[in-house]
Structure formats: structure tokens, C-alpha cells
Image (cartoon, grey):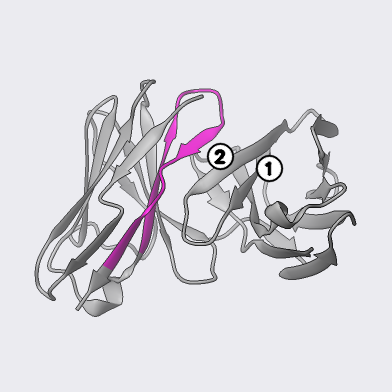
Amino acid sequence: SQQGEEDPQALSIQEGENATMNCSYKTSINNLQWYRQNSGRGLVHLILIRSNEREKHSGRLRVTLDTSKKSSSLLITASRAADTASYFCATDETSYDKVIFGPGTSLSVIP
Amino acid sequence: GAVVSQHPSWVICKSGTSVKIECRSLDFQATTMFWYRQFPKQSLMLMATSNEGSKATYEQGVEKDKFLINHASLTLSTLTVTSAHPEDSSFYICSADRGTGELFFGEGSRLTVL
């Protein structure tokens, strides 16, 4: 069964704008990760945030985690056309040794 | 960075044949590898967790006799789709865990069953 749920399912923005994607999950987790996938390709790891962390930055990426609300957000600042891809959150459940992916957000950045 | 190689990238086969997909961690040892299936415009669905030297753990609804997983070494896991049918056509992706919590993904294998 899927753990994470992302919203929005699809997002279209102009180049230079910020893009925010949200992820919610149901059970306790060890960590939450965000991945990017270009069409027809494998996944690229973007950032991992542990359950005891609240915010993490990596370049133009900013991830927050609210374990009380069981939610996370991914912010991409100053978006570029090359950021066009699908973005998935994935949770590492506490009880089971596996990583479950949410349905993903399809981001389109218009030049 | 850690590299995971998946082969083949794309395979077309006739209905009834078996297809083997390999997943290799090239520069690290992976005690655990995961196999996912992805339909167009959908997320990754975990099929099974593969542990080196032991039997794979399959997710509910995944036929273990249909999708044979072998994790023969710390750098290689294979997924064999047995007696493939058109409904097995999909994008199969593996990932490897090197113990840091971060997963490293292969580029995926697109299976088309005619």
C-alpha cells in the first residue's frame, strides 16, 4: 500500500517562480526522501530528511518535515525549465524495512 | 556517487517467454535491493525487497512465482518475469540501499510483451 500522498498532482509555473509540493503520510517514519524522475528514466535522489529534523536545504531545494502533521514540503526556488520532471516523496516506515513512494507531482516549468 | 546499473534498458519479448532483468551496484555493496514497477504517469509500486543470501519479501498482491527474485551477491539482484504476458508490460526499476537510508536507483528497464 502507498504511504505518501503528494499534492498537487500536477503543477505548471513560469521559469523563475518558486514551486511548492506537499507530501502527507500515515504511519511513523525513520526518514522521508524526495526524488526526481525525468520521463522514462530512473529516479534521482534529491534530499533526505530524518524524523528528528525539521528543515533541510540543498542548493535551490528546501524541505520541511512536520511529524506532528505527518507532512513534508519540497520548495524549489527560482525554477528553471530543466526542473521539469516528476517529483516523488518516499517514506521509510519505522515498522518495516522498506521505502514507499507517493503518487508524485508532475512539475512543468515554462520558459 | 553510488551507481546502480540496470540491464537491459528495454526488452521486447513474445508472450509466454521469460525475461531476466539485472540490477548491479557498481561501486558499493548493497545488502538490500528493492524492485519497483511503474505504470505510465503513475508512481512506483514496491514489488519486493531483496536481501542478499535470503529469500525476497514480496508485497501483497505480487505473485512470487511470476516474479522471481534472486539476490546472489552483495552487488547483484535479478528479477525474472516468468511466462510474460502483455499485462506484465511495464517499467521495472531497482534500487539499492548501501546502509545510509538513501536509495540509489537504476535507470529502469522497460518491458514490452507482445
Q: Is residue A86 left or right of residue B35?
A: right
Q: Which image quarter holds the C terminus of chain B?
A: bottom left
- Name the amino acid, label 2: Ser
The amino acid type of the residue labelled 1 equals Ser
Position of B102 relative to A5 (above/below): above
Give the residue pinned by disc 2: A95
Query: Mark 2 or mark 1, which has the lower sequence index?
Result: 1
Tag 2 secondary structure: loop
Q: Secondary structure at mark 1?
A: loop
Label 2: few (<14), some or many (≥20) within 10 Å? few
Residue A92: x and y, percent? 59, 40
Q: Residue at x 26, y 38 (%)?
A: B77
Residue B108 falls within the magenta-colored stretch? yes
Q: Position of residue B15 (x, y in %)?
A: 13, 76
Residue at horizontal 68 percent and vertical 59 percent from the top: A84
Where does the magenta region start and end? B91-111
Query: Is B73 left, or right, of B41 in this rendering?
Result: left
The foreground one among B55 and B19 is B19
Where residue A55 appears, as percent x and y from the top left, is: 85, 34
Q: Are marks 2 and 1 in contact (CB under 8 Å)?
A: yes
Along the line of sight, which residue is nearer the eye, A105 or B12? B12
What is the residue that sits farthest to the left in this orientation?
A: B17
Q: Main secondary structure of the magenta part?
A: strand
Where is mark 1, residue-wise? Answer: A28
Q: Is residue A89 left or right of residue A58?
A: left
Q: Quadrant of residue B70?
A: top left
Q: How dense is the environment of label 1, judged by Cα within 10 Å: few (below 14), some, or many (20 and up)?
A: some
Q: Position of residue B99 (x, y in %)?
A: 49, 23
In depth, the one of B47 and A41 nearer the eye is A41
Q: Chain of mark 2?
A: A
Residue B18 vs A10, above or below: the answer is above
Asked whether residue A58 appears in the rendered view, the answer is: yes
